Image (cartoon, helix red, strand yellow):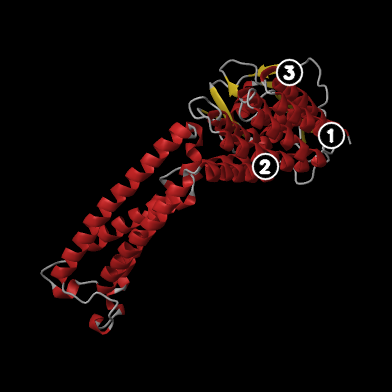
Amino acid sequence: MKDRIRHYWEFLRASLWFVPVLMGGAAAVLAVGLLTWGRGAVENATDYWLLYAGDAGNARQLLSSLLTGMITMTSLVVSITMVVLTLAAGQIGPRLIRNFIQDWTTQVVLGLFLADIVYLLVVFRTIDGNRADTVPHLAVSVGTGLTALCLFVLLVYVHKLARSIIYDNVVQRVAADLRDVTMALLPEHGDGLMEVPPELGDDFAWVDLGQDGYVQAIDLDRLVATARRADAVIRLDIRPGHYVIGGGEHVAVFPASACSEELSGAIRAAFIVGSERTPTQDVEFGIRQLVEMATRALSPGINDVFTALAVIDNLSASMARIFDRGTEPAVLRDPGGAIRLVRDVTGYDGFVGAGFDQIRQAGSGNAAVLIRLVDAILRLAPRVQSDAQREPLRVQLDMILAAGEQNISIPHDLTILKTRWRQATERLAR
């Protein structure tokens, strides 16, 4: 259940409407409260210079002007946001748009503007210009204060947007999200070893998910409970981030006699499949976001080597945290200790390959990129705890050297690459 809750929370966190709707509703409640109980809170408004002290006609004119200005300002904010998102999609990558959308600053600013409009609308419609005793002085004063606050927030928001499209800041933000996912999904203390799943035999039946799309989340607790009720063992040949097709071989049930229509339906209900990958249970998602930025930066149309180098540096830090924490458990047991779920998890070779393969391929002719990749592995070497971590790094080093020998034509650059390769190889061997 907690995995499903995390998935829906990620969905809400990556939406532009959730926080504004909450703030708009809170503003409506505030307006109703001040109009209902705030009228008698101030005996004489002229005694307080901060409070509005005019008549009903002037109050309507003031609120009308504030409301018109706020609607115009909100349109401006939305337009600026769309322009920034368009630039980010073209330069950085469309799959990174969710990182801009889920930024709390953007959501709160849009929410504040919407809340002010809702508040002004509720207060404006209650003022009767023909009755002087209907002026809610406190409510009008709060509306004026909210509008003034929006003016200052607009300046902060423009500054935030201007900094948000700087490549280095985007890289840091994506790396921070990857760090959070790593801490949430991977064990806190790892020993560098990977659990070997047991052999379950050939007596099994396949269960397909019945739909096409990316696996976004899996309710593991539900699968364990389902397998326990059926006295069976479930093996997952897919994991979050994989693309599945209807009718494919996705889940195996041992023994085959335990696979019923009821069990198949319960297994399908434990999966959430959608049109895009999400970071809910997918550590590789953040790695691939960083890699996408690096490969785009190395494309002939952009040719931004410095961004690729920044991505490599952050990837090495992320990989170090993964090495420290270990991999997800491949075998899950019920409270009685019986094996109920065997699943496919990403190993160290998968993490290293996802982080370095495409960058190595895209930058195979760039000496600076290949040297920085070797330096990243050299920095990772002290964090290696087992052969399962060491071997994919050693293989990656050999492929980087082979790419350099094949594509780098300047002897000096190739000599530097070989020197760094030798240092990294020797450090890994220790």
- Image point (88%, 33%), residue name: 429
Q: Are marks 1 and 2 in contact (CB under 8 Å)?
A: no
Q: Position of residue 17 (x, y in %)?
A: 40, 45
Residue located farthest toward the left when viewing the structure as drawn? 130
- Which quadrant of the structure image shows residue 357? top right
Label 1 belongs to which residue? Answer: 428
Residue annotated with mark 2? 182
Task: Mark 1 vs mark 2: give the one in front.
Answer: 1
Which circle's residue, 2 or 3, is located before the other in the chain? 2
Q: Is residue 133 left or right of residue 426?
A: left
Determine whether, in the image, residue 300 is placed left or right of residue 256: left
Q: 279 and 18: which one is in front?
A: 279
Mark 3, secondary structure of its residue: helix
Query: On the picture, is 265 further left or further right than 110?
Result: right
The structure residue drawn at horizontal position 68% and vertical position 45%, both measured from the top left corner, is 183
- Mark 1–mark 3 Cα distance, whole angstroms, equals 49 Å
* Residue 45: quarter of image: bottom left
Question: Which tag is nearer the camera, tag 2 or tag 3?
Answer: 2
How many other residues sit within 10 Å of disc 1, few (<14), some (14-19) or many (≥20)? many
Q: In what element is the residue under mark 1?
A: helix
Tell me the crowding category of disc 2: few under 14, some 14 to 19, or many 20 or more residues within 10 angstroms, Cα based: many
Q: Earlier in the sequence, mark 1 or mark 3?
A: 3
Q: CA distance from mark 2 to mark 3?
A: 38 Å
Secondary structure state at the residue bearing disc 2: helix
Question: Where in the figure is residue 283, as x and y percent of width and height?
Answer: 65, 36
Say which quarter of the image contains residue 327. Answer: top right
Q: Nearer the viewer, mark 1 or mark 3?
A: 1
In which quadrant of the rendered image does the N terminus lie? top right
The x and y percentages for residue 307 are: 57, 37
**Residue identified by numbered label 3:** 257
